[in-house]
Amino acid sequence: MTRPTASSKLSSVLHQRVLTRRQFLQSVLVLLGGCATARGPAGTEPTSVAATATPPPTVLPQLAHFSGDFAFHHAMAQMQYVPRHTGTEGWRKCGDYILSQFATQGWVAEEQPFVYQQTDCRNLIGKRGEGPLLVIGAHYDSRRRADRDPDPAQRTEPVPAANDGASGVAVLLELARVLRPEDLQRTIWLVAFDAEDNGGLDGWDWIAGSRHFVSTLTQTPQGMVLVDMIGDADQQIYYEGNSHQQMREQIWQVAADLEYPAFLPELRHTMIDDHIPFVQEGIPRLT
């Protein structure tokens, strides 16, 4: 969510530690499918990008495995576009890159345009599968000023957003390669949220993109997982206070069974992040 420093780094955790086994994600999705749901508000569906509306390819007989190297490649690709806060040229090019990757991996790529603070914004969505809906999200915008950088000289500079931005989207894009929702009898939406990270600057609030996304839902997700700031050098993933208690306990147990030491079953954070609009609609969620 929000650690705006101009010196943010993307660590080698994307090579070695970030969800390196597809089995973990499959287990998470199965658990999500068993969660209770609440009906969300009606609205309008996003607009399809016509060129990307390609049917999913035939299911491969062998399971793919999550590659930290591939995720790192996607993170570095995003780092070509600095700054990439909403409305900038870097933001536009980064968004186009995300949509192209969804489409390349056989997902239906859609953009959901909206206006916030007189600025054109867009959420980016990759859709695939049939069955109950599950959402996996991350934000792709960056913070326009590093107002909390420990170095006062850097506080007017844009945040590179390697960890707080690029790392989460890198996970989404690698999941687009390895996940086969049809194997799980689920519909999965991979969502790159816009306008998340500029709260408190120039009259902006936090999480505008996810608020808009949830307000337009016509289908209630069975669950939502948010991936944010997953590129720390010493990755430690704690319970988060606004996450669904049963979901987090079950998922952390899966991590323990698979011997992932980075998942620590202790409550350490309560965050304002893109899962909050799902919280407010009673949709099971995890960050």
Image: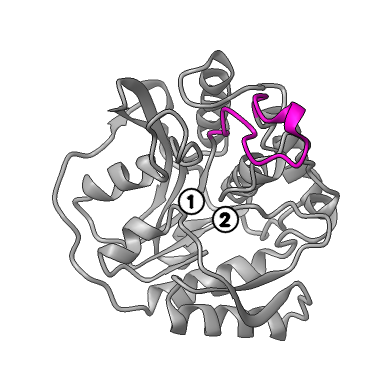
In this orientation, which residue lies closer to the viewer: 217 or 102? Answer: 217
**Which kind of residue does numbered mark 2 sit on?**
Val
- In this view, 35 is above or below 281: below
What segment carries the magenta color? 141-158
In this orientation, which residue lies closer to the viewer: 27 or 225? Answer: 225
Answer with left or right where residue 134 lies relative to residue 263.
Answer: left
Earlier sequence position, callout 2 versus callout 1:
1
Q: Quadrant of residue 263?
A: bottom right
Tell me the residue that label 2 is attached to.
227
Q: Residue at x 27, y 73 (%)?
A: 37
Q: Quadrant of residue 284?
A: bottom left
Q: Quadrant of residue 223?
A: bottom left
Q: Residue at x 47, y 40 (%)?
A: 107
**Which kind of residue does numbered mark 1 sit on?**
Gly
Answer few, some or many: residues within 10 Å of disc 1's Cα (few below 14, many 20 plus, some between 14 and 19): many
Residue 79: x %, y % from top left: 71, 28
Looking at the picture, the colour scheme in use is one colour
Residue 195: x %, y % from top left: 43, 35
- In this view, 223 is above or below 114: below
Q: Residue at x 81, y 45 (%)?
A: 69
Answer few, some or many: residues within 10 Å of disc 2's Cα (few below 14, many 20 plus, some between 14 and 19): many
**Which residue is most to the front?**
152
Answer with left or right where residue 96 lies relative to residue 204.
Answer: right
The answer to whether the residues at label 2 and label 1 have Cβ atoms under 8 Å apart is: yes
* Marking on residue 137: 1
Q: Secondary structure at mark 2?
A: loop
Question: Does the segment drawn in magenta span residue 177?
Answer: no
Residue 23: x %, y % from top left: 65, 70
Q: Secondary structure at mark 1?
A: strand
